[in-house]
Image: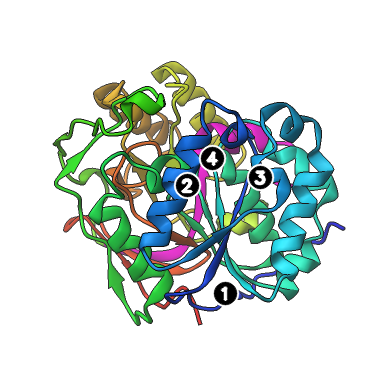
Amino acid sequence: MHTSNHKACIKPPRLKKGDRIAALSLSSGMAGDPAIRWRYEQGKQQLTELGFEVVEPALTLAGSSVVYHDVKGRAACLHEALLDNEIAAIIAVIGGDDSYRLFEFIDIELIRSHPKIFIGYSDSTSIHQMFRMAGVVSFYGPCLLVDMAENGGIFDFTKNSFEHILMKHNVTYTFPWRKEWTSQFVSWDEANKKVSRKMQPDEGGITLQGSGIVEGRLIGGCFEVLSMLRGTSLFPAKEDFKEALLLLETSEMHPDPIQLEIDLRTLGVMGVLQEVNGLLFGKPQDNLHFESYQVSIRKVLQEFHLDDLPVLYNCNFGHTEPKWTIPLGVTARLDIENRTLTLLESATV
């Protein structure tokens, strides 16, 4: 059942120690593949050590082929988790490239009437749009197979953001900046389970342009996924971008700067860029195109006479670790000169 977007921001109940979290394979089903299963168990164990009980519907660990072909079953798993009063939150196991296929089977009203924490990033951007359509806050943040299964344990920075946003009542909350980052790929072979990824110093937030302080509702996600959704009912309406703070980050596909320009320019032609109060861009994975993206972003904004639009670059969300947990649909303040992002309300109730 598809319904139009409701502007009222419904907040899910706050997470607490001892709560049950459902791990769902709404996109890739690799967690159930024999070679990857150990990685899932590692993430489950590390979430358990944080004080949660992790459960999974049968489809979660059914394997890549079964999950790929059973789109309706994936949607049913989400419905099941929403309806189960024993489940407090839902975490995406991993991303992928096709979770928008679930849309025709998703009951948007069910999301609205049973609001729960949903957290994930990358291809989960499509699921976040379904929560947006339901008018329910969702959380752009860690997934199980990457962040929660990190060799050597969940990064403290990731854990602290996860707990602050999902477990505490924050009238206001200013996101800290990480000192180090990584996107080094250590093959997910069980023989490597004790091999921690190498960290390197982070450049911190970078002001690309603009001045002053702006406020708006947080909206957005993975840039490539949002581009995939253009022309579908899942892509936000122009009014959804009005006076919003738009989050964009690129994936492991490493789009070249020309492609970034094309897709960003399309948002300008659609009138989207002219609606927002500010832009926040995540650090590109592997820092590839780190400088070129900055040039491309400024170039396209100048084409639409948006030279003064506040843009904060190199933010701590998306396809690098450790990362923030960002509540989509919540009002925040961007202080572009001091390079701070502050939530102006609690994301949970």
- Residue where numbered disc 4 is placed: 94
Of the residues tagged 3 and 4, which is closer to the observer?
Answer: 3
Crowd rating for badge 1 (residues with CA inside 10 Å; few <14, some 14–19, many 20+):
many
Is residue 232 a member of the stretch shown in magenta? yes
Tag 2 secondary structure = helix
Q: Quadrant of residue 169?
A: bottom left
Residue marked by disc 3 = 60
Q: Residue 285: which quarter of the image?
A: top left
Position of 84 compared to 282: left or right? right
User: Disc 4 marks which amino acid?
Assistant: Ile
Is residue 269 something one can see in this rendering?
A: no
SS at circle 1: loop
| Labelled disc at residue 144 | 2
Q: Which label sits on residue 220? A: none
What residue span does the magenta drawing correspond to?
213-234
Identify the mark nearer the N-term, 1 or 4. Answer: 1
Dot 3 crowding, Cα within 10 Å, few <14, some 14–19, many 20+? many
Mark 1 vs 3, N-terminal side: 1
Q: Position of residue 43 (x, y in %)?
A: 43, 47
Q: Amino acid at mark 2?
A: Leu
Tell me which numbered mark, 1 or 2, is placed earlier along the sequence.
1
Rendered location of residue 261, percent (x, y): 45, 24
Determine the residue positioned at 65% across, 38% down: 27
Q: Nearer the viewer, residue 275 or 151?
A: 151
Query: Which residue carries the number 1 mark?
Result: 12
Task: Point out the frontmost of discs 1 and 2.
Answer: 2
Q: Name the residue at 36% across, 64% down.
A: 50
